[in-house]
Image: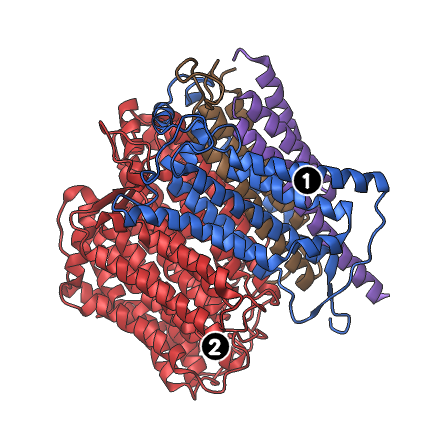
Amino acid sequence: MTRRLRMIVLALGGAGLAALFVAACFGMPGFGGDRHPYGDRAVHASLARRTANTISSVNFDQRAFDTLGEMSILFTSVLGTVVLLRQTRDEKRGRPQPQEVALPVRRYALVVLPVALVSGLYVIAHGQLSPGGGFQGGVVAATALHLLYLGADYRALERIRPIGVFEVGDALSASAYLVTGLAGVLAGTAFLANTLLPYGTFNTLSSGGTVPLLNAAIGMEVACAIVILLARFLDQAVEIEEDNGKR
Amino acid sequence: MTVLPYLVAVWIFLTGCYGLATSRNLIHAVGCLAVCQSATYVLLLAVGYRAGATAPVYSDIKPGSRPVVDPVVQALTLTDIVVGATVTALLLSLVMQISKRHGTVDPDELRELRG
Amino acid sequence: MDDPLIVVVLLLVAAAATAAVAVRDPVRQALVLAVLGVCLALLFTVTQAPDVGLSQLAVGSAVTPLLIMLSVRKVRRRQQDGKEKER
Amino acid sequence: MNHLLPLLVAAPLLGAGLLIACGRRLPRVAAESFGCAVSAGTAALAIWLCLNSSPPLTEWVGAWTPRNGTSVGIVLVGDGPGLGMSALASLLTLASLAYSWHYFDEPPRRHAGSYPALMLLFQGGMCGFAITGDLFNAFVFFELMSAAAYALTGYRVEEAKAVQGALAFGVINSLGAYAMLMGIALLYARTGELALTHIGRGLDTHGGPDALTLAAFVLVLTGLLVKAAAVPFHFWLPDAHAVAPTPVCMLLSGVMVEFGVYGVWRVYGTVFSGPGGIPAADLERALTVLGILTGAVGALMCWYQRHVKRLLACSTIAHVGLFLVGVGSLLPEADDGVALYLLGHAGVKAALFACTGLLLDRFGSVDEHALHGRGRPLRGVAVMFVLGGLALAGMPPFGISLGKAVTEEALGGPLTVVYVLVSAVTGGAVLRVAARVFYGLGPQPRVGSACETTGAGEEPETRHRLSRIPDTMRAVPALLLAGSLAVGVVPGFARIVARSVNEAGSGGALTSAHWTAAGVLLGLVSTALALALAALAVTRPELLGARPWTLPLRRLQSGHIGDYVAWVLLGTTLLGALALPGILTG
């Protein structure tokens, strides 16, 4: 298809879709409206189960099955990336030369690293209380680990980041989420039912029944997943080279 | 004015589509797809917003003292953001392999799979 | 809409998204995407969604641009190698 | 028993998790056998639940049983169609795993479990999509099966075509999924609910349909139709299905694409069929037009392919068109027919892909012209390929034929002609390939055109080129064909399918599906037509060769992602325009 024809098709399709969308926007309830039936029920249910952060309650209790699916997508994408970025037969591994990093940058990275790591873990742990949780904290913790690339060098990063361990951790935390869910079936209630553990005291770390457990599983899963993803990409960008003999 | 956020979401979605269709670099195209996805976040959160309400987190407010915004859409968006990043990673790894096998990341130069 | 702050941030987001598409060089696009991520995080915070804002800040403005940069580095390195070989 | 519904999702996912956790130490045989065992266990569970699905099972995940008619949880619906689809998906996953067992190319070093794990994740996603009764949850599982499918399609990263096809697949399907999510957000804005039935009720209480309903309908259907590969959303499919590893093709063509059709049926039936939704006439117009277009384009593209996997992929597009026409009629009998047709098609299409995979592994090519006469030694495969072609053309007593006959009878009139023609052309193309490749009939064609994909120079998927074909790889297509035959001949099976489909939808109407004289006759007519077309093509190649007027159509299939995105947008507009009249008048 020529460029011109593509632009015509695109213009037609885009115009139609835009008209449809804009018409729909004017049929929407106004921004900031007061009618949120599902949301109100969710808030109510969250408070009944003594989970202070309603969003965590929705994610890990009321709609925990969604989160199961999302977690599986994460798991699948990471597995897919590992498979797609594998070292193929015509590639070899090169040794990256250590690069000079300015001393202030290095010091800064090494100071920030533990702070960021701890704040990541803090964000995971307080998921059912304050804004944050497994998804956010996991990303923060995983990214923090990569400050070591700046702070020391790639080799140091590789040493503290045994990728196999993270892959196993990724799979185990995904399995832990499922096993927690299955415990509900075995106990005779329902899959992912939050009825096994006491709900605890409102606004404390141990409140919310299984919410903290699932939250921790997700935190670990996300952290491992992001570490593996970044590792695979770094691997490609820094280490893996094409075999010069071929191609 | 009450439709502005929705219109912004629509604008972002269509802009992303335009970029995707006219992109000359597959990495850029994947970036445009990420733009399309951010339109869904804006739309979802705009739908859940409640004027004058506060965040649905009760660690420092008393339950029932103030109206809160819809937590459901926030939960949906939250998970979607992380997942979006990993799917982007999956697509980017495909792009890297395309660059290895075809020697280009310009969609106009990929000359297989036709007819 | 009574909150002018939301309007301003919304327009910022729209502008950043447009820029992310209009910038055709992937490295610069990664930077603009990071800016878009920050703008979105800001928007989510002012619309009372701190959880989502935090998530967007970590993912949208750090991880995604980083992945794009790494891909670009790989692709460029490959193409340079290819050119050297041709010479 | 309804507590066991979530296990259909949890079991494969847990299996995948354990495979990855232990896969680094596991020998390959153990990992693959474990994968087979998990998918077989899930399949058994799905079949058992399916047999007990009257009245339909419902399960609120997390024990959030509704109080006063409302709930904050996610509902799973275990009715006949949902459980049937998950049983079908599980059985096909098992078949693909068995087909690739031991012989499939080396897994990546220290990742012996990754291929079966991806297959299990794919299975989990499909099962979840089949049984969920919540729109956002459906989106999540939709994404899960897509993500697994992208990774599996690009699995052979050393193949230039494979990675390109996988990227087109990934980008277009992700775009479709985001469109669907926009639609879900619109529906949430209107109704404030996410469960399918609640959204439907919410639309009805709001009053007649308006622009918002239309936009939501169009966007949600865009996502589903991209997956179903309806024209003009179909461009990604030949690219992806032609390059994916054969066992993955069996799943993609056999059941994943059909999930798009299933999704359309489910979403329309529970969300948009009320007075506040989209009027029936509009849906009928939209799906019939798109369906006929899809059938015609698919059949034409199919006929002119020489890359055998691409040919089969295009025939899937054509048959999806027929499914859409059947579903779009909204007649309970047509629903029964489509269900039977879909079951029969899954077995036949998977078997045909499996046979093509054998050609690839044996000869390192899937090009119809290059393989001319070389398949002679493979007698068993030849028989299966011919049977597959005949079944695709609608020969009784295969399941496809029964399903087609029941649907044709319900539709009547000119749509029957579409059914007969499309099945004759697609079946004829397969028979033509069989005649040339396995029997060496006719002259070896020499013509080639600039804008086509040949199937030569492909790498076998096994470690080495096979010198003899292993029994498992031969048994799988045979069993699949037998299954497809059983759909048509096992007495009472059609009645059970019809009953469970009607119980779940169709407004409680009870119909029965069985063979009729007219149906058998139509099946024979289309088979005869297919045979005639194949014979003509083999003996007089220039007569049915490429025509100049088909060139533009084939040029549209350009392999360019930008083109495909533009077509998706145009398709969305087309869908909106087709469904518009009822909104304007209503």
Q: Is residue D492 left or right of residue D14?
A: left
Residue found at x 57% / y 61%: A83
Answer yes or no: is residue D425 visible: no
Q: Where is residue D563 in the image (x, y as percent from the top left)?
A: 57, 49
Q: Is residue A87 above or below residue D444?
A: above
Residue found at x 59% / y 47%: A226
Do the residues at pointers 1 and 2 share their chain?
Answer: no
> What chain is colored brown?
B
Q: Colour of chain C?
A: purple
Q: How is the image coloured?
A: by chain
Q: Disc 2: which chain?
A: D
Q: Position of residue D503 (x, y in %)?
A: 17, 47
Q: Nearer the viewer, residue C70 or D460?
A: C70
Q: Pick out the residue farthest to the top.
A: C2
Q: Nearer the viewer, residue D511 or D325?
A: D511
- Secondary structure, mark 1, is helix
User: Within the image, what quadrant is residue D576 found in?
Assistant: top left
Q: Nearer the viewer, residue B85 or D566?
A: B85
Q: Chain A is drawn in which colour?
A: blue
Q: Chain D is drawn in which colour?
A: red
Q: Disc 1: which chain?
A: A
Residue found at x 21% / y 70%: D397
- Secondary structure, mark 2, is loop
Q: In this view, does D283 lie above or below D277?
A: below
User: Within the image, what quadrant is residue A51 found in?
Assistant: top left
Q: Position of residue D66 (x, y in %)?
A: 25, 32
Q: In this view, does C64 lie to the left or right of D406?
A: right
Please name the residue that numbered disc 2 is placed on. Answer: D103
Q: Is residue D54 left or right of residue C38?
A: left
Tag of residue A114: 1
Residue found at x 61% / y 25%: C42
Answer yes or no: is residue B61 visible: yes
